[in-house]
Amino acid sequence: QKEVEQNSGPLSVPEGAIASLNCTYSDRVSQSFFWYRQYSGKSPELIMSIYSNGDKEDGRFTAQLNKASQYVSLLIRDSQPSDSATYLCAAYVIAGNMLTFGGGTRLMVKP
Amino acid sequence: DGGITQSPKYLFRKEGQNVTLSCEQNLNHDAMYWYRQDPGQGLRLIYYSQIVNDFQKGDIAEGYSVSREKKESFPLTVTSAQKNPTAFYLCASIPLDSMNYGYTFGSGTRLTVV
């Protein structure tokens, strides 16, 4: 099992809808998780981080962490075409002081 | 402003040629990383360094080399032994013992074999 796994998509949602991106992780990672957004041809940018069980909200973004189910999600409310990108889920690996990444989910928001 | 600078943005390599990608950071981060990304794929770790004068191989180190002579700098050399180097290369950094920080990424170098 990979340390962090994501559905590659594409996930297609209409403009204004809620986009739900999901990520599962193994026991080999720590409890710190990060969501990066990567536009085509650009480098990833950090949009959310979460360390505690529950929800964390920042504007239109909500990160959710469920430690019992080893599940992290990112909700994007009122999705806009400009949200169309690949979203990378990452977990901190204590032993290596590094992040391990899922393969990314491509999100397409259609006008 | 603090950040990571990668150069050049685009690089063309001829068959059999070694090329070096630059990565410089002024964030005072201890650890630095090189990743390769192929079209439509995730990030694959090439090399990483936690402290000056020390570095470790990642998952796909063959055909690549690095050095870490200064805290601020972590250049990556793509050697002629790397048979398929065309990809997007990303440099990242993070403080030590930083489980609550994410990586800071550079803007990337796109390498093409001509």
Image (cartoon, coloured by chain):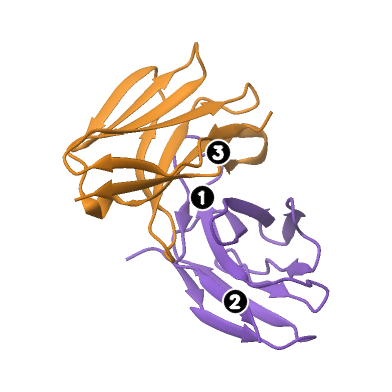
Chain colours: A orange, B purple
| Measured Cα–Cα span from mark 1 to mark 3 | 9 Å
The residue lying toward the viewer, choosing from A38 and B73, is: A38
Q: Chain of mark 3?
A: B
Callout 1 crowding tier (Cα within 10 Å): few <14, some 14–19, many ≥20 = many
Q: Quadrant of the N terminus of chain B?
A: bottom left
Instruction: Identify the disc placed on residue B111.
Output: 2
Q: Chain of mark 1?
A: B
The residue lying toward the viewer, choosing from A1 and A101, is: A1
Disc 2 marks a residue whose amino acid type is: Leu
- Which circle's residue, 3 or 2, is located before the other in the chain? 3
Q: Nearer the viewer, mark 1 or mark 3?
A: 1
Quarter holding residue B20: bottom right
The residue singled out by tag 1 in the image is B94
The residue singled out by tag 3 in the image is B97
Residue B50 position within the rendered picture, expressed as x and y whole percent measured from the top left: 65, 51
In the rendered picture of this protein, how many numbered marks are placed on residues? 3
**Vertical comparison of B2 with A59: above or below:** below
Q: From where the camera sits, is residue A66 visible?
A: yes
Callout 2 crowding tier (Cα within 10 Å): few <14, some 14–19, many ≥20 = many
| Measured Cα–Cα span from mark 3 to mark 2 | 32 Å
**Vertical comparison of A25 with A13: above or below:** above
Left or right: where does residue A94 sit relative to residue A55? Answer: right
* Disc 1, SS: strand
* Residue occupying image coordinates x 45% and y 54%: B104
* Residue occupying image coordinates x 39% and y 28%: A73
Q: Nearer the viewer, mark 2 or mark 1?
A: 2
Disc 1 marks a residue whose amino acid type is: Ile
* Residue occupying image coordinates x 24% and y 54%: A82
Q: From where the camera sits, is residue B48 visible?
A: no
